[in-house]
Image (spheres, coloured by chain):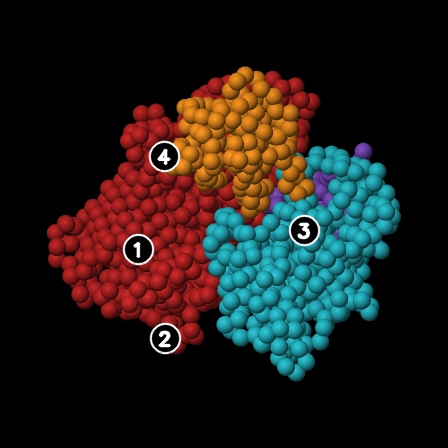
Chain colours: A red, B purple, C orange, D cyan
Amino acid sequence: MSDYSVIGKRVHNIDGTEKVTGSGKYTFDVVLPNMLYGKILRSPHPHAKILKIDTRRAKRLVGVKAVVTGKDTLGRKQGIWRRFPELCDEEILCRAKVRYIGDAVAAVAAIDEDTAEEALDLIDVEYEPLPAVFDPMDAIKEDAPQIHEGVELNININRHIEWGDVDEAFEKCDHIREDKFKCSSQAHVCMETHDAVASFGHNGKLEVWTSSQSSYYIQRLYADMLDMNESDIRVTNRHTGGGFGSKFELDSAQFCAAILSQKLCQPVKIVLTREEEFTATKRRTPMYYFLKLGAKKDGTMLAKEVRVITEGGAYTAMGATALYLTGFFSSFPYKYPNYRYDGYRVYTNTATTSAMRGFGAPQSTFVGESQIDMMAEDLGIDPVEIRRKNGMTPNYEVPGQAFIQSCGLHQCLDKIEEHIEKRGKLPPNHGIGVSAYGFMSGGIFNWFNTPYAFSAAVVRINIDGKVDVYTGTCDMGQGSNTTLAMICAEELGVRLEDVRMFSGDTGICPPDLGAWGSRQTLMGGNAVKMAAAECKQQLIEFTAAKMGVNIVYDLDIKDRWVHLVDRPERGVSYFDIVKEAIRGKDGVAIMGRGHYTPHRKGMISPAYSFGVQAAEVEVDPETGRYKLVNVTTAHESGTVINPVGIEGQLEGAIMMAGGYGFCEDQPMDEGKILNPSIADYKLIRSLDMPETDILEIDTYEPEGPFGAKEAGEGLTNPTAGAIGNAVYKAVGVRIYDLPITPEKVFKALKEKEKQQKKAKK
Amino acid sequence: MKKELKFKVNGQPYEIFVKPKTLLVEVLRDLVGLTGTKRGCSSSSCGACTVMLDGMAVKSCSVLALQANGTEVVTVEGLAKGNELSPLQRAFLDHGSYQCGFCTPGMLMSSTALLTENPRPTKLEIKEGIDGNICRCTGYNAIVRAVTAVVKGEYKEAK
Amino acid sequence: MKIEGKFTMKAPIQETWDFLLAPGTLVSCIPGAEKMEAVDDKTWEGIVKQKVGPITIKLNFTQTLTELDPPRHVKAMGLGSAVGGAGTFTQETIVDIKEVAGGEVEVAYSSNVSLVGRLATFGERIMRAKVNKIGGQFIQNLQDKLESELGK
Amino acid sequence: MINDFEHFTPKTLKEALALLAKYGDDCKVICGGQSLLILMRQGLVSPKYIVDIKGISELSYIKDDKDGVKIGATTTHRAVEKSAVIKKKYPVLAEMETRLASVQTRNWGTIGGNVCHGDPAGDPVPVLIALNATLTVAGARGTRSIPVENFSLDYFEVDLKDGELLAEITIPPPPPRTGAVYTKFNIIESDLATVSVAASVTLGAGDGVCQDVRIALGAVAPTAIRAKKAEKVLKGKKITDALLKEAGEVAATETEPISDIYASEEYRLELVKALVPRMTKEALARAKKA
């Protein structure tokens, strides 16, 4: 595939210069004339009835322009699972009841942030605290307080996945393991907190600038909540300071800014504080995992049974999807002939858990990859070998669920085995742990109930040959604009610098579901490619006519040269052809439209990426402290469109997923998050970052644009498991709950010492 | 109540009246209008607001504006010379040392201050130099590679 | 943040109870309490001042006896809201008294303190230490008072 | 949100003391402000007056004289870290500084400010205790000196009376054959300590006997503390691994750690037991080389 002229090249991100000069404008930087600043009052109680809200004192404060409460809303409930009204359960501005510490109850608009903040202290809310429940294992008990009316045992949603005959298969197993695990929460910690500038005009139309992963979702959810037409709402996402799964649901900054602006017909800007970001936005789903795994003596795994209870927090959000995906990915990346999953998402009086990079799969991969190492040890099989024996292969069907076309798992296993062998004998207290994973390239499910194609794009060629791409995809920093521009440039036969991207603006771009579930390269890419192809076809038709070539010849465009495929020297300049073609079309710019919706691709995703990671740790057995020494990843994501982008995704994922394994957590006391600041929330910084090596594996995905598939989220799946396995290899203790803190390692070491002493006696 | 703050930002002198409680970052963003400098936390922890003050990196959210009286501040907007990007800016571009870009101005200022002080830092010193800055996207190693490339002389200073 | 414990002392149970319930005994054990005044026989109001380094917190404090089962069980709820809106502070104290051998009584207590609002976000590390200390002082004061009044 | 205040920028120590005397309880001293501003932003501290001593140049110095090295209170961490004198005479102090928070914080924050903040997890105090430093406190009625180990009183409380300012830190010349080390145990490299240990060992001439030892612990009590009983275990003896282990066990009994989100009380005790012997041994090795 080396004949690509754009794809696979090391390029600067197309918005790179704006980012290194500080000239790029984020929502955080937007200032409009006559703009006000908003702040949100939040519940200090985990569960309480709102008896009365008195805003009079706040309204009297000089500089305060409006104070709103739930009474100023239509009282609707939002949810991203729009097909299921019972799962739309979040008012955002609560009217009768608050369900977690951080639930919004009122909002203020004032001339500046200080005044708005001062006004919050002047709003008197009378609460009647209700009994609250924080742990899902408590919340499913008969006598637990009910968090949502009519929801029995607080079970928000359950999912069942099954194939084969699990019970019969367990009978045939030589060895069965049953293990319990607990996965912790994690905060997204986007550097730009959630923010929005909402501006209602007197014409009743709403314009919003917001830091978002899906402008279309935000637009549609606004329309639901405000009872407006989608088309009267324009949502623009400028540069977005990180998303990681936290920014594609309507949030309190967006909603409150709009409600306030609606009252005043003035722009209102709300930027969540870092503390609100930690306590009052969504987070990764904590899960209790119960696993049963059965294998033959030779390591062939015959059956797996998985039960999961997840801490849902106060509302549904995308948690329902996380529940499904953790169940599906618990079978990854292995060929289990018999599999059963039962998952329950339980409401609790804690901050809502939802989507975060990996979307349920980092949890399932941590538990699954820990257990498979234990199984390998029980059976006396090498960890790489047991994975090889059971690992997925190309053209494999996950029964009734998914069809996997490209799959490079086995090449990845080979490379990682080589890496481990090369490392040779390790120094004392070092260990290398292995973890295999897979992930989807965009979801097929349509619980959002969009009537539109999942992805769509318009490509326009202007008179100077320069190309504008319009797509509803959102660049939140992952570089999708660059990747999509590369796809467009390659398809059309122009250079990257010829392409300009217009994305994430619902006012001018065709709808796209946005940046989540690792969908944009494949789905957005296919749409852009199709639109570019349509443009190219028009130019080729025109050229063929103009050059009068024999109809047996094929024409193509490469690097701004329209030419005969078989005789590349025979051709014309792309720029000349564009000029003439437009003239020939009565002055209409060349336009192409593209779209993509997966059809007949199973239940989950049109394509899957795979990889294997090896983490090396060094443990100090006297304290339990360990260091991440090196993380090496063999990864395949189909054709690599943007290599610099993939490296960035990979190393960034190691920082985030390493944090999930090593130190990131959100401990709570009675529903209160105890570390809502970056000083107290520990995350990996440069000195803590391990060395990272990438072993790229070539594969080609027939469903993806130029053979590409996802390379964003899947990379967050393996690291926690690899760390757990590495710690075990280093000092022989297994940690069953995340994060794997030095204290847990230390305690396990002490326990092991005690057991050994006992055994000696 | 307001007091006069006289200082230079990117070489340009300013005389601004500010309330004593005003932070340096607020003056730079809201009064001088340089929004390249970001804010990411309220606990001096994230480094997104890093600027150079008399040649050294400081967190501008943790400096009272009046404490900058008489100093020279350089922000990310002051790194390029005309249309010529600084070596670090070019190296960041080449090495993909940014993704969402929100931490990038702070990262560049920390790296620039580091190289001003110590033109030949070791890898560990580079890591230490940017340890006060959080990047949630890149995993830092690409930033370390970019700074290393500048240290190795792969990027010449603009004339 | 919960503190639990028990101590025994030589005193008749009824006297212990009476003293415990005497107006002001419980509130006077609250560290930093100032100007506590009785609103009725179960409720006191006043100001509680606490200091953590440079931070001085002034709380409007109300203490209410919510459960009474003479002469063995009392539960008191304290609620403080910080002047200036920095947060609220709640304290739930349970004292159970029972007779043990030798004319002694065993006083079992538990005190659960929690903070809500901005106060709580000032470094968990610091606040937890401080709140533990306040809880500990409260119990110490109570024990000292009981012992000095009755335990001789 | 920071509440409004009046801001004074005295140019001399005398001016600063006069302002403190005038405004008493209503005013706070700011220097680098790396700790105070966080509290002010959260609205937890709202002084009416701020006396900003950052600009008092007479308090920013590192001087080497016969009594030892004197560090002015407004000297930045970074100046301490880079000082040739400090690196030569008290390398442990410079090493500690390189691990204190971030470069940005060290550039603006001051060693005096850190000591006065009274954070039991602060880095400089345990090292200063191990180095037997003395503080000079200035007030309206003159100055007084106080050993650094007695300066911290409680969580975030130090022995500064109204109207007083920390002026200087004096570190006596290290006796010959002395080695000192500092380490902090934390999860993230640049983080505050979960437990920290500073140790200084002085060996007798030629006999290898521990003539003097000072062990200071951070983050295991309301203030940084000196583990005097543990020191006694080692003092006057030839240090062996068994003695070190004992010293660690004894040191643990001198602490009163709490459980928090970073570590349980029990774990902190175990860390003290593990780190005191390890660090003392390292100090010993340095003393042998000195």
Count residues near mark 2 (Cα–Cα under 10 Å), then give few for <14, some for 14-19, many for 20+: few
Mark 3 to mark 1 CA distance (whole Å): 50 Å
Please tell me which residue lies in front, A265 or A491: A265
Mark number displayed over residue D152 = 3
State which chain disc 1 sits on.
A
Count residues near mark 3 (Cα–Cα under 10 Å), then give few for <14, some for 14-19, many for 20+: many
Q: In this view, does D169 lie above or below A113?
A: below
Please name the amino acid that badge 4 sits on.
Tyr
In primary-sequence order, the first of circles 1 and 4 is 4
Please tell me which residue lies in front, D14 or B43: D14
Q: Residue at x 37, y 39 (%)?
A: A135
State which chain disc 2 sits on.
A
Please name the amino acid that badge 2 sits on.
Glu
Q: What element carries label 1?
A: helix
Q: Residue at x 46, y 39 (%)?
A: C7
Q: Which of marks 3 and 1 is in front?
A: 3
Say which residue label 1 marks. A368
Mark number displayed over residue A421 = 2
Evaluate whether label 3 is on the same chain as label 1. no
Q: Position of residue D42 (x, y in %)?
A: 63, 38
In primary-sequence order, the first of circles 2 and 1 is 1
Residue A754 visible in the picture:
yes
